[in-house]
Image (tube, rainbow, N blue to C red):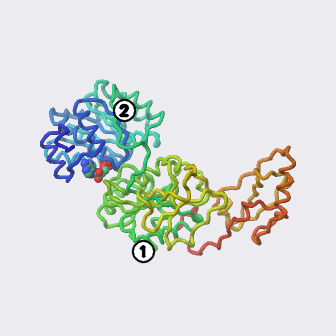
């Protein structure tokens, strides 16, 4: 199928041809004819599937007829972040260059007076983040009675960011007779409820299965001690010769710390997070987009919608708390069919978040094999499902582990026990040691020492019921008695559970490494 088959006007087709696109993507193939027919559309599509052009192209044609009145936009696109809103507006400029549509972008952090001036002239397309739109509405600068097409983009992101009450309010201000296009990368109960509330007799279109990662992205994982993360990222940048990479942190504060740290070590980086003033955000983004800066250290504000071509790598400096953010982050690479790499730096404390991600993407993330970082790796603990490895330049196609050793085993991953990463912590004897069964090995009580202050607090030992079956108890006691004592485990008498014996010891942190909880940089 070609774009000519979709029913778009000659001028819009010219805009598409100028952009260099010849074949519509699956979401465009499905959505464009439906939107041109005036149908409501529920689109389940991640960024990178061409969904933005999927709704901007037909909108350009629909809006070509008619004129906007002052302060009364004819269509409204709500996007969760300023960057995404700006990108949608770029799409209108790019594809609509042979039409004369007027457009306004209402985003926080930009001059309100300028935005009001544009609105006063009348706009065909209004692209806005929810907060700024409601602000201008409350001031009486905008009237929504003339909106005939409403687009809600990245609905799941709106939900994550707590914007749904604002979105519901905005929708209540728009005429009921309208065409609604609702896009979300994932579909859960709440998103479905919103779709049912906002759409009428909608056609559902789907680009790929929800929350799947692009097959062109090779994924890999490395597990290191928390204090080795910055050293790890530096070595990765050098080893993989990164010239165009996103580096994601979970917290804005850590974005600042890592950005300063990388700059101090001579890397060409910029930083981006939601607390930065809008002009600064745009400046940083522009530097990265133009190639002036090679690394973009960012929070999840950059995870969705940002479309920067030829990003070779995404590095997760932190494992995201929210599994779906993982899919969005790594979607910044491997775009438009190009090959990409996503490397996640984890610590043994991230096992839960990692398990959530692997359950969502339905595949274990292979361990990275890269000579430069081998000595930083925290060994897997015995009893964990073995992980397949990814070679230094990608494993099998699509980054999935090769079949073989792990064949037949469950995809549900098991991770390291957090004890594996504990540094100079003392293990203190458990009172009920002798009463434990083999199925319930002793949990060490971890005494926090100054060196372990940045580690998560140790759990209080739960009282364990006495097992009735004394045969098990006796066997456990016998086996425990036969165990050798590793020299670095103290205070366990003769009963050391097997899983504690493989707990590695780590050298003291290097002096130039700062714990993640400080605001200084190394
Ligand atoms: P999106 O999913 O809207 O973020 O778009 C992802 C990327 O695909 C953007 O760089 C678009 O410019 C590009 N793109 C959109 N449509 C096509 C197409 N039909 N062929 C090739 N690339 C496209």
54 w.r.t. 221: above or below: above
Q: Position of residue 317 (x, y in %)?
A: 49, 61
Q: Position of residue 40 (x, y in %)?
A: 30, 30
Q: Position of residue 182 (x, y in %)?
A: 35, 35
The answer to whether 278 appears left or right of 442 in the picture is left
Asked which secondary structure carries label 2, the reply is helix
Report, in whole angstroms, how far the alpha carbon at label 2 lies from the one at label 1.
Answer: 47 Å
The structure residue drawn at horizontal position 17% and vertical position 37%, both measured from the top left corner, is 7
The structure residue drawn at horizontal position 45% and vertical position 68%, both measured from the top left corner, is 392
How many marks can you see? Answer: 2
Asked which secondary structure carries label 1, the reply is loop
| Disc 2: CA contacts within 10 A as few (<14), some (14-19) or many (>=20) | some
Observer able to see residue 378: yes
The structure residue drawn at horizontal position 36% and vertical position 68%, both measured from the top left corner, is 243
239 w.r.t. 257: above or below: below
* Mark 2 vs 1: CB contact within 8 A: no
Q: Position of residue 47 (x, y in %)?
A: 36, 48
Reading the image, the residue beneath label 2 is 170
Q: To which quarter of the image does residue 163 belong?
A: top left
Reading the image, the residue beneath label 1 is 266
Question: Quarter holding the N terminus?
Answer: top left
The answer to whether 364 appears left or right of 294 in the picture is right
| Disc 1: CA contacts within 10 A as few (<14), some (14-19) or many (>=20) | few
The answer to whether 10 appears left or right of 138 in the picture is left
Observer able to see residue 117: no
Closer-to-camera residue (355/52)? 355
């Amino acid at each position: 199928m070609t774009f000519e088959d979709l029913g778009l006007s000659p001028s819009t087709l010219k805009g598409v041809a100028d952009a260099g696109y010849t074949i519509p993507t699956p979401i465009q193939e499905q959505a464009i004819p439906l939107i041109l027919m005036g149908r409501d559309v529920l689109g389940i599509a991640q960024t990178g599937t061409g969904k933005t052009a999927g709704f901007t192209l037909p909108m350009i044609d629909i809006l070509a007829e008619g004129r906007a009145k002052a302060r009364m936009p004819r269509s409204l696109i709500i996007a969760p972040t300023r960057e995404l809103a700006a990108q949608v507006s770029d799409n209108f400029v790019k594809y609509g260059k042979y039409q004369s549509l007027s457009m306004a972008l209402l985003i926080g952090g930009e001059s309100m007076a300028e935005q009001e001036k544009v609105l006063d002239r009348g706009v065909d397309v209004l692209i806005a983040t929810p907060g700024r739109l409601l602000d201008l509405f409350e001031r009486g600068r905008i009237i929504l009675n003339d909106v005939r097409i409403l687009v809600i983009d990245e609905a799941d992101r709106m939900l994550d960011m707590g914007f749904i009450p604002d979105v519901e309010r905005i929708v209540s201000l728009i005429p009921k007779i309208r065409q609604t296009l609702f896009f979300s990368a994932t579909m859960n109960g709440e998103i479905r409820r919103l779709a049912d509330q906002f759409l009428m007799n909608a056609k559902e279109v789907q680009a790929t299965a929800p929350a799947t990662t692009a097959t062109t992205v090779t994924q890999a994982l490395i597990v290191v001690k928390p204090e080795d993360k910055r050293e790890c990222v530096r070595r990765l940048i050098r080893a993989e010769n990164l010239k165009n990479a996103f580096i994601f942190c979970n917290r804005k504060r850590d974005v600042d710390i890592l950005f300063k740290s990388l700059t101090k070590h001579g890397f060409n980086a910029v930083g981006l997070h939601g607390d930065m003033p809008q002009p600064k955000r745009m400046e940083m983004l522009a530097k990265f987009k133009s190639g002036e800066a090679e690394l973009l250290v960012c929070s999840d504000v950059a995870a969705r919608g940002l479309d920067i071509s030829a990003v070779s790598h995404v590095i997760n400096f932190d494992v995201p708390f929210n599994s779906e953010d993982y899919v969005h982050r790594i979607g910044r690479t491997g775009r438009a069919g190009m090959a990409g790499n996503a490397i996640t730096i984890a610590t043994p404390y991230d096992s839960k978040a990692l398990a959530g991600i692997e359950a969502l993407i339905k595949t274990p993330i292979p361990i990275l094999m890269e000579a430069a970082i081998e000595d930083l790796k925290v060994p897997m603990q015995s009893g964990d499902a073995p992980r397949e490895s990814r070679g230094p330049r990608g494993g099998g196609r699509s980054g999935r582990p090769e079949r073989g050793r792990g064949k037949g085993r469950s995809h549900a991953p098991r991770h390291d026990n957090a004890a594996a990463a504990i540094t100079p912590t003392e293990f203190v004897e458990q009172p009920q040691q002798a009463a434990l069964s083999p199925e319930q090995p002793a949990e060490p009580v971890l005494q926090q020492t100054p060196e372990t202050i940045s580690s998560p607090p140790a759990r209080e030992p739960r009282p364990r019921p006495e097992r009735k079956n004394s045969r098990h108890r006796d066997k456990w006691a016998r086996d425990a008695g036969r165990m050798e004592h590793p020299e670095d485990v103290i205070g366990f008498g003769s009963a050391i559970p097997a899983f504690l014996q493989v707990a590695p010891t780590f050298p003291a942190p290097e002096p130039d490494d700062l714990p993640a909880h400080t605001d200084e940089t190394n």
